[in-house]
Image (cartoon, grey):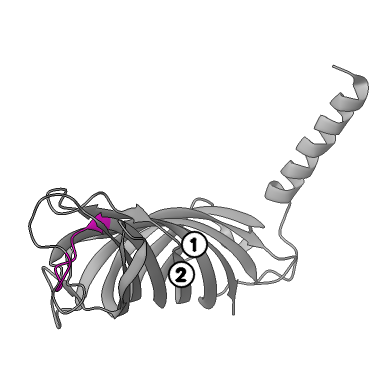
Amino acid sequence: MKPNKCILIFVLVLLAQQAFASPPPSKYEKRIYSFSLAGGSGYSFFGVDKRHSDPAKSLLLLTGTFRFHFFVSPNVHLQLGMEVMSQKCKFNTYYFADGHSVFYDKAFDYTHRLRTYELYIPLMARIGLTPQEDNAPAVFFLEGGYAIKTFLAASSLVTDNRTNEDVWGGSTELTFEHWFMSEQTSSVIIAGMGFDKRMGWSQKFLSFELLYRYNFSRFRYQGNYNTNNLMMKNSCVTFQIGYRFQ
């Protein structure tokens, strides 16, 4: 290996050690709570009954989150927040309206594009892998918890694949198979990992999170005034970039 490359590698290793192992500056102070904002995108998984539909494909997912962090210990946070998510998928199935699908013939001649708008109320625990997190410039962490999920709204667009014409578009009702409080409300579990990077010598951090959400209950897609009655299973993976402050 050339001497210049050796020197460069040595300098990079030295800088990395300084970034993660240097003593804390005097401005670092212990905190008992903070707040965070985050936004991101991801990929959805929709499971359908293949006797009634082709597999569903994920389209654009967007999410935004606000959380309150309470520090049980320097590296353990309890998080309570609110998250708004929009998921979208498309799938080929029937459209039982006048002049359209008549029989269960597995032709699946209609493409449905479904967009959902959802509200989550999560309660989560975050465990940092650095015990003395107050004095660390960067921290890897694991997190998981439970969230109440409510459908705020949903819309659908139906296209006839034989003519490539849109035959219907508008709002549609989604209801959970197993619900509580209301037919639009159920629950999910959340698990993931992330990385916090302190901004300078402040109590402000940039956060990067990879989260998986699993819905306990299937939901029913009813289409245009019950022209469809399709049960769907949902989970998703999201990548979020956040800002934590006090």
Choose between 176 and 52: the one closer to the eye. 52
Choose between 115 and 109: the one closer to the eye. 109
Where disc 2 sits, the SS reads strand
Quarter of the image where the C terminus is located:
bottom right
The secondary structure that most of the magenta stretch takes on is loop
The structure residue drawn at horizontal position 60% and vertical position 71%, both measured from the top left corner, is 243
Q: CA distance from mark 2 to mark 1?
A: 6 Å
Q: Residue 216's x, y, as percent? A: 19, 61
Q: Pointers 2 and 1 in contact (CB under 8 A)?
A: yes
Q: Is residue 64 above or below residue 207?
A: below
Magenta-drawn segment: 92-100
Q: Is residue 223 above or below residue 51?
A: below
- Disc 2 residue type? Thr
- Disc 1 residue type? Ser
Q: Is residue 73 above or below residue 16?
A: below
Q: Residue furthest top?
A: 1
Using the rendered view, name the quadrant where residue 175 is placed.
Answer: bottom left
Residue 212 visible in the shown view:
no
Q: Mark 2 — residue? A: 63
The structure residue drawn at horizontal position 14% and vertical position 68%, both measured from the top left corner, is 96
Q: Is residue 25 magenta?
A: no
Where disc 1 sits, the SS reads strand
Q: Residue 152's x, y, as percent? A: 31, 82
Q: Mark 1 — residue? A: 41
> Of the numbered discs in the image, which one, if any, rests on residue 132?
none
The structure residue drawn at horizontal position 26% and vertical position 74%, both measured from the top left corner, is 148
Choose between 195 and 30: the one closer to the eye. 195
Q: Is residue 94 magenta?
A: yes
